[in-house]
Amino acid sequence: MPESTEHAHIVIVGAGFGGIGLAIKLREAGFDDLVVLERAADLGGTWQANTYPGCACDVPSQLYSYSFAPNPDWSRTYGRQPEILAYLRRVAAEHDVVRHIRFGAEVLDARWDDDRSVWRIEYSGGQLTADILISATGVFADAKYPALPGLESFAGKAFHSLHWDHAHDLTGEKVAVIGTGASAVQFVPEIQPRVGKLLLFQRSAPWIVPRLDRATSGLERFLLRRIPFTQKAIRGGWYAAIEGFGLISLVDKRFRHPYEALGRLQLRRQVRDARLRETLTPDYVIGCKRAIFSDAYLPALDQPNVDVITQGIAEVKPHSIVLRDGTEHAVDTIIFGTGFTAIPTAFERFTGRDGRSLADLYREHPQSYLGATVAGFPNFFCTLGPFGAAGNQSAIYMIESQIAYIVDAVRTLRHTATRRIELRRPVQDAFLTEMATRSSTSVWLTGGCQSYYTTPDGLNAGLYPNWSFEYRRRTRRFDAESYEMSS
């Protein structure tokens, strides 16, 4: 990279909730020399990328939004994709951070230069160096496909929910949906009335609990605009309700019984067929993998044009799917609702001081400190890194905690004229030992299921095994004593 390469004090990768929030708070702290690299043509992160029918958030909008940018005009309890994307665009515009974003700028390589104490970054469109690099790429960025023999021979249409083909008409088709994660739970009720036949391939039944979504009234919005305390109170109420799920994962699995009873009641009320109810009954503790809020999914499966198939797939042929017992089903379209890769592509492209990438470290075992910094990666921060997300709280709450920590760190570097900082490895090791100890009895590891909550060898894949308010206490200020700092 030539010496004349453009330089920025701070480079942020990703323009979703994390990247936009960071840019806003860094600018408020007086840091204007920053660049946000976004690979897509628009901001919004996952809310720009996912456009499948029914795409919505499973956290109430009053909580799934920035605390510093409340929105009294959410149209429903749970925001849908177009409305969430519009909210992010508006917040970014109001805080004048769009001018810092370079769209269509996918990071191809980012390496730490130990001689000059800078990050050298190559992206589609140019090169630059940075004193500080921050990853806000998110963890649900790249689609995961199952390895199905013969899939390449399929003559029909096949696509992932992350790459929904809106030009393809499903009306009257025989459609196979593979996967029953959160995305599938949302799009299945949307497409079921239109398709001729829907085959849902289920590996394990998800826990479905009532969503209770509804439109907000004009009076509610009026009160939220005129009485800001009302919005804070509602946000606090939702925070406490969602934090309560931690009783199952963090305290005692016996707290699962009320939640599981609610799920079973929903199943009995919405599915008439006893055999289908048995198929749709989970065989693991609620909270072991992500519970899903929905009022429409179960009724959609109880329709004459839907078959739920639990038999494994042996192969895919040009116009059909063959099960392991030899049964063959004619199929026109295959839709994958199989989630996302455990290691985002971007992690392969961040290389630290010793020549190892973030992905290399993650494959060894998930590691970071507070989900915000990583030993061996000087002048580097991240949002929602390993052990920086909580299974019992909104991702936005955790992101805002990390933003506060990162901004305080950057402010500390400025005040102390520090050019280089690096997390002390013993600090990270002690943190990881704490995470492993606290996780050993958690429902994620002992609840009888496999999910993206765990690694292939049965370890915690990166959820913070404690209360979110405890996490916020730990990230309230930058603990400079945990880092090697040099000017």
Image (spheres, grey):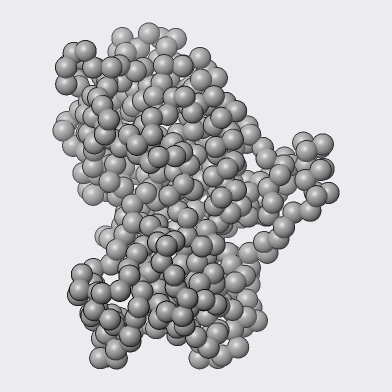
Where residue 134 appears, as percent x and y from the top left, is: 37, 30
Where residue 180 sits in the image (x, y, percent)?
Answer: 43, 70
| Along the line of sight, the residue nearer the viewer: 367 or 399 | 399
Q: Is residue 364 above or below residue 372?
A: below
Q: Is residue 266 depicted above or below 413 in this figure?
A: below
Q: Quadrant of residue 326?
A: bottom left
Image quarter of residue 377? top left
Q: Position of residue 298 (x, y in %)?
A: 56, 77
Relative placement, left or right, of 422 versus 189 is left
Please tell me which residue is depicted at 51% across the width and 20% down the height of the picture. Answer: 27
Dividing the image into 4 quarters, which one contains the N terminus? top left
Along the viewing direction, whichever of 479 and 102 lies nearer the viewer: 102
Report the front residue among 3 and 273: 3
Please give the name of the residue rendered at 44% of the width and 43% of the height, measured from the top-left corner: 45
- Residue 210, given in percent of the width and then of the height, sits at 63, 68
Horizontally, residue 101 falls left or right of residue 148, namely right
Describe residue 453's horizontal placement relative to residue 22 as left or right: left
